[in-house]
Image (spheres, rainbow, N blue to C red):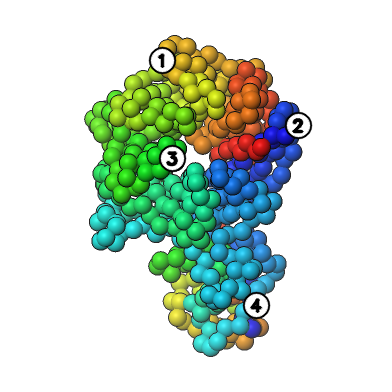
Amino acid sequence: MSSVRVLVGTKKGAFILAADGARKKWSVSGPFFAGWEVYHVKGSPVDPSRIYASQTSGWFGQIVQRSDDGGQTWHTPGSRPEELESTDGMPKGESNKFVYDTSAKTGEPLTTHQWYDGTQHPWEFKRVWHFEPSLSDPDTVYAGVEDAALFRTTDGGRTWHEIAGLRGADGAKWQPGAGGMCLHTILLDPTDPKRIFIAISAAGAFRTDDGGRSWKPINRGLKSDYIPDPDAEIGHCVHRIAMHPSRPNVLFMQKHWDIMRSDDAGENWREISGNLPSDFGFPIEVHAHEPDTIYVVPITSDSLHYPPEGKLRVYRNRTGGEDPNAWEGLTKGLPQENCYVNVLRDAMAVDSLEPGGVYFGTTGGQVYASPDGGDTWAPIVRDLPSVLSVEVQTLR
Amino acid sequence: MIRVMLPFHLRTLAGVEGEITLDVPAPVTQGSVLDALEAHHPALCGTIRDHESGKRRPFLRFFACEQDLSHQPPEAPLPEAVAAGREPLLIVGAIAGG
């Protein structure tokens, strides 16, 4: 019997929502790491019992949590009681040590990026926004962090090392978006282990084809009126990119404003916003079984972070944007009056059951599920803390 | 034995309740107490002082014997009452906001 596990990160802890394949009756466990901001929780596609969580605090900094039993118990990698008794002596406790690489061999001689006022500012680690577990090894995980950089562990989270070549892609021109200068999206190409796509607010999208040694900006076709040169190669506030694993050259993007599509792995982008009520928003997702079915949640504007007209609507386009006016508003089960929540960039996910499910969480603490690809929605929970991220594990 | 009181969230993280007691060889300093604390509770590494610089995180304070020791150098001896175990070293989250 198939089942799903929804991993929810919130402003005040993490929660796990579980159901069988019907996705009607849910159990809720948590809060885990109560009182801490949990930016992201994600399971390994190789070993679903292995889950990583980013736990952060303005007081105490970054913590990396790992579960080896599907979220029932957690530990900071390298500090379990049995590891304390290791013959190697006391562990160093480096699972939360994210240090930018400035070495001559691998690190770029780069120590500053652009600050809000246009001056240069030193790189300072603040938190992990996103974990992306490897498609082939549960001990290998990529971490997107603020200030924007990409880190990787190959030992299950005990130690982290920067993939420093990324900052060599004009890092001095990167600047923070309103939410900070964060690397929030990591897409691994299932057909080519050396190809990775990432996105940064506010720098843009980047791609490596050599396993992270070198990176190129992939932002041709984006236009952003909030930067001096609207067509610049660097500086776009990309909110999210998405890919269907069966078609990794086709990318979809929710930019600050504008929904975009690329058919050549990001080399060129074209706008597909069409008939949306607003093309501002944060998440974008692709249906698990239909590579041309995409979902966004329109938000009024960059000044008004809530749905247009107070109506919470997911929009679906079943042509992959080929017909940009084919967006349909999905409203059944969603509040259609007095709704002023936001849906953040990492707070939407899909399952791979049949029919495919769609999930999202709001800053108002609701997590909505649709077991039928968006046709109907129901809240799994209504009163969690503000939701930062939603991921789904399909368990078979 | 040196007594250390952690803030709520760090007690949870370290999996301890109440005060922690540590065997710290003389001279007992802020630095040597934190070294011992992190060695016994590696999950606390990086949460009280920065991994690289070793500096106290800005929103944490160190108090003992009704004194603010936050700005004492790490190698400065802690008060004799702390070294003798009569008083705890208090690690406190700074109050920010209301």
Give the distance between the C-alpha atoms of the residues marked 2 and 3, in whole angstroms. 33 Å
Chain label for disc 3: A
| Residue A188: assigned label | 3
Residue annotated with mark 4: B21
Sort mark 2 into few (<14), some (14-19) or many (20+) by Cα contacts within 10 Å: few
Asked if residue A227 shows in the view, the reply is yes
Is the same chain shared between marks 1 and 2?
A: yes
From the image, state whether disc 4 or disc 1 is nearer to you.
1
Image mark 2: chain: A
Secondary element under disc 4, as helix, strand or loop, is strand
Q: Look at label 4 and name its amino acid.
A: Thr
Residue B23, position in %: x, y? Answer: 61, 83
Q: Quadrant of the C terminus of chain A?
A: top right
Observer-side mark, 2 or 3, equals 3
Give the x, y percent position of residue A294. Answer: 49, 23
Q: Which residue is at the front of the view, A24 or B26?
A: A24
Q: Are the residues at dot 1 and dot 3 in contact (C-beta closer than 8 Å)?
A: no
Are both tags, 2 and 3, on one chain? yes
What is the crowding at mark 4: few (fewer than 14 residues within 10 Å), some, or many (at least 20)?
some
User: Earlier along the polypeptide chain: callout 1 or callout 3?
Assistant: 3
Q: Could you tell me the amino acid type at mark 2? A: Lys
Residue A351 rendering spot, x and y as whole percentages: 60, 31
